[in-house]
Image: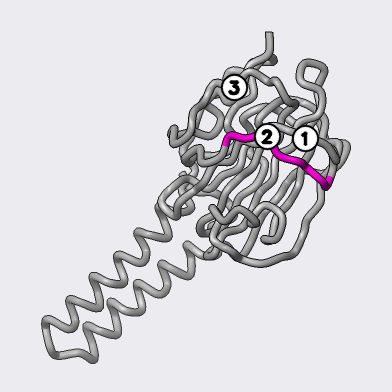
Amino acid sequence: MFHKEGTKTILLGIIFTAAVLLLSDRFIDTMWLKKLLQIAAFLILIIILQFFRNPKRSFTIEENQILSPVDGKVVVIEEVYEGEYYKDKRLQISIFMSPVNVHVTRYPITGVVKFSKYHPGKFLVAWHPKASEENERTTIVLENDRFGAILYRQVAGALARRIVNYAEEGMQVVQGTDAGFIKFGSRVDLFLPIGTPINVVLNQKAVGGKTIIATKG
């Protein structure tokens, strides 16, 4: 199963691969060169397909849990000053997505979208300390009765050139469902109230819609 945001890219990849196969078979007589080009075309198509994969996952909505919004590795757990929305200290959990991870973004809680804003910016490597403030990014705030307002931020990386965000202010959203997509390497930051009990550790592998980031009794 593939994400709808990859439809155009996958189609172009298939056309490119077919063209390489047909043209190389017709115009290239050197066998090793022909095979090399054909194998390279297939590898490019495989990379495109694996990047836009969207594995089907079942979700059980848990009101007392914040679930990981993406697949990746937990690279930051620290108290920081969040200056865009809260303008005070928050607990930041950052998850880095490599190009081989699933790049679907999922809603970490069920609630109402209170804030959603796109920021153009730089394309620093996603793990750079300034990436959350200077890179192309979107900031989304969800609110429910259990956790209050929590913020997550999609951050473009050095390879990412398009962030897709489906959250619009006023929407009622469901935990674990599709919230957007980030193309080609990136990270997502979560900003939670100070003192929120955290269930993950640094360098832990997180699975979008499955891994429990935090709980609240």
Is residue 35 shown above or below 147? below
Q: Are marks 3 and 1 in contact (CB under 8 Å)?
A: no
What residue is disc 2 on? 79
Q: Is residue 43 magenta?
A: no
What residue is disc 1 on? 89
Q: Is residue 15 left or right of residue 180?
A: left
- The CA span between labels 3 and 1 is 16 Å
Compare residues 3 and 209 and report the one nearer the observer.
209
The local secondary structure at tag 3 comes to: loop
Pointer 2 or 3: first along the chain: 2
Compare residues 61 and 159 and report the one nearer the observer.
159
Give the residues drawn in magenta, as a range. 77-84
The local secondary structure at tag 1 comes to: strand
Pointer 2 or 1: first along the chain: 2
Check disc 1 and give the amino acid type.
Answer: Lys
Q: Are marks 2 and 1 in contact (CB under 8 Å)?
A: yes
Residue 108 position, x and y percent, is: 65, 30
Number of numbered markers: 3
Taken as a whole, is the magenta stretch helix, strand or loop? strand
Q: Which mark is residue 198?
A: 3
Check disc 2 and give the amino acid type.
Answer: Glu
Check disc 3 and give the amino acid type.
Answer: Ile
Q: Is residue 212 left or right of residue 149?
A: left
The residue positioned 55% from the left and 23% from the top of the image is: 212
Q: Nearer the viewer, mark 2 or mark 3?
A: 2
- Report the colour scheme: one colour
The residue furthest top is 217
The residue positioned 73% from the left and 51% from the top of the image is: 138
Residue 188 position, x and y percent, is: 61, 44
- The CA span between labels 2 and 3 is 12 Å
